[in-house]
Amino acid sequence: MIKVGIIGAGRIGRVHSESITKYVKGAEIKAISDVRVTEELKEWAKGMGIPNVYEDYKLILQDAEIDAVLVCSSTNTHAPISIEAARAGKHIFCEKPIDADVDRIQQVLAEVEKAGVKFQVGFNRRFDHNFKAIKNAVVNGDIGEPHVIRVTSRDPDAPPIEYVKVSGGMLFDMTIHDFDMVRYLSGSEVTEVYAAGGVLVDPKIGEAGDIDTAVITLKLANGAIAVIDNSRKAVYGYDQRAEVFGSKGAIQTANDTPSTAILSNVNGVIAEKPKYFFLERYMQSFADEMACFVDSVVNDKPTLVNGTDGLQPVLIAIAAKKSLDEGRPVKMSEIS
Amino acid sequence: MIKVGIIGAGRIGRVHSESITKYVKGAEIKAISDVRVTEELKEWAKGMGIPNVYEDYKLILQDAEIDAVLVCSSTNTHAPISIEAARAGKHIFCEKPIDADVDRIQQVLAEVEKAGVKFQVGFNRRFDHNFKAIKNAVVNGDIGEPHVIRVTSRDPDAPPIEYVKVSGGMLFDMTIHDFDMVRYLSGSEVTEVYAAGGVLVDPKIGEAGDIDTAVITLKLANGAIAVIDNSRKAVYGYDQRAEVFGSKGAIQTANDTPSTAILSNVNGVIAEKPKYFFLERYMQSFADEMACFVDSVVNDKPTLVNGTDGLQPVLIAIAAKKSLDEGRPVKMSEIS
Amino acid sequence: MIKVGIIGAGRIGRVHSESITKYVKGAEIKAISDVRVTEELKEWAKGMGIPNVYEDYKLILQDAEIDAVLVCSSTNTHAPISIEAARAGKHIFCEKPIDADVDRIQQVLAEVEKAGVKFQVGFNRRFDHNFKAIKNAVVNGDIGEPHVIRVTSRDPDAPPIEYVKVSGGMLFDMTIHDFDMVRYLSGSEVTEVYAAGGVLVDPKIGEAGDIDTAVITLKLANGAIAVIDNSRKAVYGYDQRAEVFGSKGAIQTANDTPSTAILSNVNGVIAEKPKYFFLERYMQSFADEMACFVDSVVNDKPTLVNGTDGLQPVLIAIAAKKSLDEGRPVKMSEIS
Amino acid sequence: MIKVGIIGAGRIGRVHSESITKYVKGAEIKAISDVRVTEELKEWAKGMGIPNVYEDYKLILQDAEIDAVLVCSSTNTHAPISIEAARAGKHIFCEKPIDADVDRIQQVLAEVEKAGVKFQVGFNRRFDHNFKAIKNAVVNGDIGEPHVIRVTSRDPDAPPIEYVKVSGGMLFDMTIHDFDMVRYLSGSEVTEVYAAGGVLVDPKIGEAGDIDTAVITLKLANGAIAVIDNSRKAVYGYDQRAEVFGSKGAIQTANDTPSTAILSNVNGVIAEKPKYFFLERYMQSFADEMACFVDSVVNDKPTLVNGTDGLQPVLIAIAAKKSLDEGRPVKMSEIS
């Protein structure tokens, strides 16, 4: 039984708290910290059986009983807190992205390596039952050598413009999950990126300097070609599909729906829309990534989403942004 | 190349004419007859390249060049014309049902046997690509021993009350195809029938002495149990599905649709309705039954829907009607 | 926040314990009892945070702090314990069936009514996301008036013969859920039952006096006709589907699968088998039935599966058994 | 009733002959020509009821009774014969591609315009029931403004290397249909092309200077982005799918299969593979394109696949090839 501290009590911090409390054997939460400790937070923590609520995350890092921390604070603090945590000898689960800056990510990875602690990055979709089924088929050789990887990733609705402005851009905020998915499903590294993007959903997004629609082609080291298509707004819900096509076949997934019910009437044969909200859609993956992290710590196994897995999607996003800006394919070797 | 005469130029007679002309190698139509030879019919026959149009079907039977006849006239004439045709040495394709009267059917079968001519009954659904796929799976042993057979057969709309009154009743008019389907898919004979029926679609159908909704249970000689569910009106279209469940698995079919397109919008994920009209839905089966009949004649093979196959569904329908009337299961041995 | 006592710490008692602990707000488990208190049970209870483990369930009934009990003990004790619990003023969640004997069920219902306590029976499938989607469509009028209800319920494998011998028979042990489902989906009462059954899966089941395959037709008070098909063994997994067909359309559900992945290779286009194990398939429904029960107690609402809902399926099963034995449809009015 | 001459009696010439004979009202075939008139061809023509078989196609062009010709000869003769046919005042159905050379295509179009004859190019897939359903949805506004168009087009097996060598390359031979499809489904013109390609199916294809796998991104004038993925070999069959995603929803198609049968067994839930052979898959579209061409001639309507539709995909293929060779996106304005 390990003891966990959670740094950041926002939405994702609470999601992980619930996962650990409800589904993960072998871990208990000893403390949670947040820059704003409200009555509501205290109440919530009490309900969850979390004994300590701090304003200062350093109290977590200083607690010798705590084995591992979850870094769920605001993105710009992921790197410095991770570094501190590594130096304090804590195993680290760090929400994605580690940082927008490559040097800072490298620094985190170096500290993690030096400290010899576990480090897992929050690319939860790798633990999703559907994508995992694809991955398993690829690893088992069911589809032979991968030739083409397709990822469709469309949000149910665009975020507020205020968020768009500080999000780092769609490629870093949203597509980054898909870059990770391509690496995960293909088992290969990206060598070149070409991004075609546009503003088709909302002109305000364009005015904020971002895109809302994209088709991104990725050449992979194993010769396969991947393509991601993104939209900030699919009116029918959260569209999350993938396909790997290879020498012996293809495997693809459909969206999860609230039920399998199909209504036949004068208007057609009508199935339900995909699950709309990412927490509903991906809850199982959040729980499983926690279980996996705890398992890595308890049983001294390598984490399934390691530092490189945290770094690479950021590098790919940088290449994709460069491609978009310069209207040409960009080699990964151009990105340091 | 055999020569064919068609007796009865109504809808089904013309469907078969088109099938032979367009799809069936090895046969040509020499003559067609109808009790009413209109200008329109002559025009149509000319367009089809049919050289002779008669009012008197006997001219077809007397034509020594004609090898085979299709009996597509009104139901009450199927038996007498088939008998005449057999005596004239013509191979016979007879539309279903051969007759509503079992003795008359027996008489036809006796004459056919005496004459040694081919005899095929128009249970076209046996040639449908979907039901054939089930049949093949059963015959290949893909589902092991059949345990449960389910047939769903729902018309897109109830026929006019005038038709209902002369139709012989839903069990004889509509379910008879499903009785044949159960025999076909199971490869076994029915031993007992229990019919539960009701008037749920249109009270006028009840007033006409018929039912419009039914669930019919059939015990089979091989121990399997079949169940048919019928409705005269499925607002979403012509619903024609079946499933055979057995010791090694199950095989089921879905409806055919005009296209595979699926529209995702705010209302749901919407596929097309089943093909609505029986000629659209079953055109391929009509063509294939003709090809099969011609093949039987040309290559002296047994027909795939023989006299027994024409008789049995009538016997089952009689048992089902008796069951409905008496509110109890009826053994086939009760029906002579 | 209500306090709950659980009587019976077998598989289902533990499932409900987990549901309450993990998913149900507003309830905590104060005690659990079992006729055999092992070290393992104590350990498990400790892990679940259940403070008291008793051998004698009466300690639970005597605890004034406990508001509600879950009766999860062996079937033959459901009725007497429920009666005692009602007399002790406890709200009751009782596993199905209440009893095999109708008089004893009636006695339980009378005591519950006298005590004015909540009473919910464990027909968990009513809370399943798929069946609930059908129910909602029916209630919303999406399919108009129900005409035909179809329930397919096939277990992945037959139980051990020892279990078969004491199970009360397939109709009482397995089909009883489907009888409940027909009532739930149709919103109507059964008036007549016809059961066709056979021994097709395993002759030993027949030797034990039971059937393993059945097709059961049910006439309903609203005129609709329902049909259930059962098998003790579907090699492809737990097959749990239903369809309601009505005047304005039809709604049907498919099986849940571990993922939506579809593999296309030289052998075909292959989806995953249905979830195999009932706990995996129905876990969401177990959690929701607990939440619903607690909600009824806390907010003084009627339970969603009440005493009548516990009684009726037993009556239908008795009628079905009589139908099977006598080879004829049996009216519910014949069953007292 | 118009009279048609067919130039070229190879596979596609015969397919069109069958379509006209069987399905198209309003046209009859007066003559067919081929550079090699064999006994087999004469026999076949007789069976089809085609009265004249010529070695010299000029006999067709000189026949004043012939209203329209189908140019089904070898690709390098499409342009010169079309020009001759236009000058002879014949309406023209020309197999795709008109020519590999843009100037020659322009010349054909100029002659066609001068002659005022109908001209239709053989992009049959526009007439396919599935793709037409997408097109209709787009035109009807069902998906709003198109944002992303996806076309998946994979052949069941690579052609012989000898064919690869003379095919003009995958982009001209296979993807050209997909370029047409993007224009058809989007209703917009391509402005820029980026092609990523590889040799993953068979190294011999690479040795022959061609690719066998590609992902091609196309920017469209209306702002939408299209992506095509191609493979020369999908072991599970002919994979032909498309999706248009837009502001109000998405519409996608699946593959056609021989039947809707689904087998559930210990290995999974197994549907049939897509139809394997292009003639089987696209027969309905071949028939409908002929009916449409004849309708254009008879009723003096514009053809649905006109000269521009013949030219543009060639220009796009040229751009795609240039993109592939130069490793950069190529603007259509770069292609004269």
Image: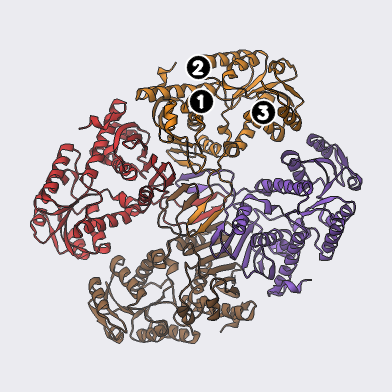
Chain colours: A orange, B brown, C purple, D red
Determine the residue positioned at 65% across, 26% down: A296
Determine the residue positioned at 23% across, 55% down: D293
In the foreground, A266 or A291: A266
Residue beneath disc 3: A295
Mark 2 lies on a secondary structure that is helix
Kindly indicate the quadrant of the structure image that contains residue D110.
Answer: top left
Q: Amino acid at mark 1?
A: Ser
Q: Quick check: can you spot residue D209? A: no
Q: Amino acid at mark 3?
A: Asp
Q: Chain of mark 3?
A: A
> Of marks 1 and 2, which one's residue comes earlier in the chain?
2
Residue beneath disc 2: A102
| Disc 1/disc 3 C-alpha distance (Å) | 32 Å
In the foreground, C264 or D124: D124
Answer yes or no: are tags 1 and 3 on the same subunit.
yes
Residue beneath disc 1: A167
Kindly indicate the quadrant of the structure image that contains residue C172.
Answer: bottom right
